Amino acid sequence: MARRRILKPEEEALWHEVARTIRPTSEAALARLRKPVHLTESVVHPTPVVPDPKPLFAAFRLGEKARPLRSAAFIAPTPAEALAQAPLQMDARKHAKMTRGKLDPEARIDLHGMTMAEAHPELIRFILNAQTAGMRLVLVITGKGKSGPDHGPIPTRMGVLRHQVPHWLQMAPLGPAVLQITEAHLKHGGGGAYYVYLRRL
């Protein structure tokens, strides 16, 4: 048991001053203090605010930097458009006259109505004979073609010869003989014919 310390005179005076202020507690107040306290409301702890982590990459949308496609991106160019994009091989002044219909062809062949098997050898014979004869400008008539019944899922091109003749003129044996191919002026058949400007032998 701990020894009781003897108060110093000033401590004892202070104790008596405090003791004078104390009032006796009633029995009802003591009963309230002895009663257990039941908490009816749960203590809500605030959720700590965690800042969002910094993203590794800036926000983006898939394909946002891709260039938009033109509506005709998957449509093959017409023969006239493909020939217009070809580089100019002949004299520019003569080419301008030819496209305006100011130059008259020295010879012409009409493939209109022929099959591809018939037209190809006839075109080869005509072009090589014209070059041998020293001609420079000839006219190849293909016709614009007729639209037939389309029964399949893949659309068929109208005017098979009109599409095929420029390819034949650029391939062997005609490619070395041909300098320039251009769609004819309206007075010489327009979209159904081609001017073929030949190289000199």
Image (cartoon, rainbow, N blue to C red):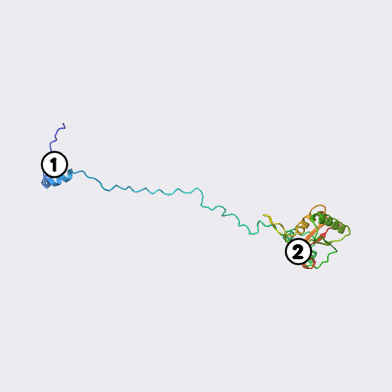
Question: From the image, which quarter does the C terminus lie in?
Answer: bottom right
- Front residue of this view, candidates 162 and 15: 162
What percent of the width, then of the height, locates residue 155? 69, 57
Secondary element at tag 1: helix
Q: Residue furthest top?
A: 1
What percent of the width, then of the height, locates residue 194? 79, 62
Image side of residue 12 versus residue 147, left or right: left
Q: Amino acid at mark 1?
A: Glu
Task: Using a 10 Å C-alpha cutoff, classify the residue at mark 2 as few (fewer than 14 neighbours), some (14 to 19) or many (20 or more).
Answer: some
Secondary element at tag 2: helix
Question: From the image, which quarter does the N terminus lie in?
Answer: top left
Residue corresponding to mark 1: 11
Cα gap from disc 1 to disc 2, whole angstroms: 126 Å
Q: Amino acid at mark 2?
A: Gly
Q: Residue at x 17, y 44 (%)?
A: 33
Above or below, comparing residue 144 to residue 32 in the picture: below
**Count of marks, rendered view:** 2
Which mark sits nearer the N-terminus, 1 or 2? 1
> Where on the picture, by quarter, is residue 136?
bottom right
Residue corresponding to mark 2: 191
Image side of residue 80 versus residue 13, left or right: right
Between marks 1 and 2 in the image, the one whose residue lies nearer the viewer = 2
Task: Using a 10 Å C-alpha cutoff, classify the residue at mark 1 as few (fewer than 14 neighbours), some (14 to 19) or many (20 or more).
Answer: few
